[in-house]
Amino acid sequence: MTTIPLKAVTLTDVRYTKGDQIGHLLAWISLIPVFITFGGFFAHFFFRRELQGICFALGLAVSQLINEFIKTTVSQSRPATCAALEACDSHGWPSSHSQYMFFFATYFSLLSYRKAGFFGGRENSWLVEALTWALAVLTMFSRVYLGYHSVVQVFAGAILGTVLGAAWYWFGNRVLVKFFPLIEDSYVGRTFYIKDTSHIPDVLKFEYDNARAARKNAVDKSS
């Protein structure tokens, strides 16, 4: 009987040595890019629909396309440990997980510094920025610890992600931002309430003040 080779969907297929508690924790950390994409950006699109967030996600998508192009072009194998992980059929340089997280940390830090009020005030922004960088480093470490990448491969992804994150932030907030008002006023923008808050320095305070004012007006009209 002919055996048909099978291939797993690797999006959430992260393996670790049975009984290794550190490996178990790092396997979950290695899934942070998936959580950010599906739990973070999808929720953001559904509830917030802000153009800055869409620009952020678009940059991450472009970064991953670049990663796949480089991987295919260079075709550098993963370390020998990939055999036990059944991951040798894909290339390893640069690490896409590492690139994703360092792109995210770079763009997020630049955005939170400029719009600190969105994250609870400038005095607290460094805490959020430190957390994103800590998660980026842990994700990078997890890929080496679990055997999916070599040290060189994860550092290549980190450097490329940092450079692309900074470049995309500049491009998005110098070039693409000029088209935000047009998108806002377009049929699609008006239909789906897609908005731009780039011009508001403290989004949380702005929304808080307007929500309170709207409630006060509603109470005054009903009384």
Image: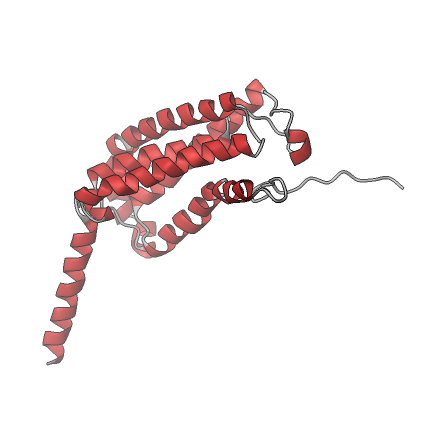
Return the residue found at the far top. Answer: 74
Q: Residue at x 20, y 50 (%)?
A: 203
Return the residue found at the far bottom. Answer: 223
Residue 64 can be seen, yes or no: no
Q: Nearer the viewer, residue 96 or 48?
A: 96
Image position of 149 (left or right of 112): right
Q: Position of residue 212 (x, y in %)?
A: 15, 64
On-image quarter of the N terminus:
top right
Q: Quadrant of residue 61?
A: top left
How many labels were placed on the picture? 0
Q: Quadrant of residue 87?
A: top right
Q: Nearer the viewer, residue 68 or 31?
A: 31
The relative height of residue 98 versus residue 93 in the rendered view (above or below) is: below
Q: Position of residue 115 (x, y in %)?
A: 21, 42
Return the residue found at the far right. Answer: 1
Q: Residue at x 34, y 56 (%)?
A: 47
Q: Residue at x 20, y 42 (%)?
A: 116
On-image quarter of the C terminus:
bottom left
Q: Residue at x 30, y 32 (%)?
A: 169
Q: Position of residue 36 (x, y in %)?
A: 42, 45
Image position of 217 (left or right of 87): left
The relative height of residue 31 versus residue 164 in the rendered view (above or below) is: below
Residue 170 can be seen, yes or no: yes
The relative height of residue 39 versus residue 219 in the rendered view (above or below) is: above
Q: Position of residue 96 (x, y in %)?
A: 49, 31
The relative height of residue 112 versus residue 221 in the rendered view (above or below) is: above
Q: Nearer the viewer, residue 101 or 5?
A: 101
